[in-house]
Amino acid sequence: MDLKEIKQVLKLMDMHGLTEFRLERDDEKILLKRQGSEFIAMPQGVAVQPIAPQAMAAVPSAAPSEAEVVEKADDSLQVITSPMVGTFYTASSPESDPFASVGAAIGPDSTVCIVEAMKIMNEIKAEISGTIEQICVQNGQPVEFGQELFKVRV
């Protein structure tokens, strides 16, 4: 992979809010991670080198469309995480009731929140059944891919 291709991947990561990109082809392996507003490149066996954000390009997002569910040490407590980088909203509008609140019963098809990414409002489904134990972020707060949104008692 040459420098031009890496710059294009970095621009695509920036445009689509991706925080990590991994590529393995033949004997080449590269891992690009975003730390804050800077990117770092981690080719296998090479020291980490910061790359200026001005040298980035855009790649289509391969982020999952639904929230990921991660099991915690307590088997009856599961976490709903953000499937993308964006802004967390508890309701479809400021005047609307929140989709989910502490103590609310939810099912796999229940919408629990919205994550806005690039002016697109993405409804996040629970994908599990249970009771909301904790809302881990505040309305209007920016969230990262994989960040905990809700703790659910199943």
Image (spheres, rainbow, N blue to C red):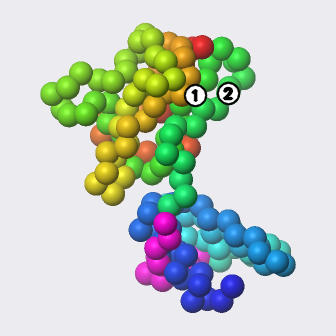
In reply to whether residue 83 is colored magenta, the answer given is no
Q: Regarding mark 1 in the picture, which secondary structure is present there?
A: strand
Quadrant (top left/top right/bottom left/bottom right) for the N terminus: bottom right
Residue highlighted by disc 2: 71
Q: List the single residue furthest toward the front.
A: 109
User: Residue 63: image x %, image y %?
Assistant: 53, 53
User: Residue 118: image x %, image y %?
Assistant: 33, 57
User: Residue 120: image x %, image y %?
Assistant: 31, 51
Quadrant (top left/top right/bottom left/bottom right) for the C terminus: top right
Q: Regarding mark 2 in the picture, which secondary structure is present there?
A: strand
State how many labels appear. 2
User: Residue 81: image x %, image y %?
Assistant: 53, 36
Residue shown at 65% from the left, 73% from the top: 41
Q: Which quarter of the figure has residue 28?
A: bottom right
Crowding at mark 1 (Cα within 10 Å: few <14, some 14-19, many 20+): many
Q: Which quarter of the figure has residue 71?
A: top right
Check the image and report above or below for 62 versus 129.
below
Who comes first in sequence, dot 2 or dot 1?
2
Q: Which residues are magenta?
A: 50-60
- Residue 152 horizontal side relative to residue 113, left or right: right
Residue shown at 55% from the left, 76% from the top: 9
Residue highlighted by disc 1: 79
Q: What is the three-letter code of the residue carrying label 1? A: Val
- Residue 40 horizontal side relative to residue 37, left or right: right
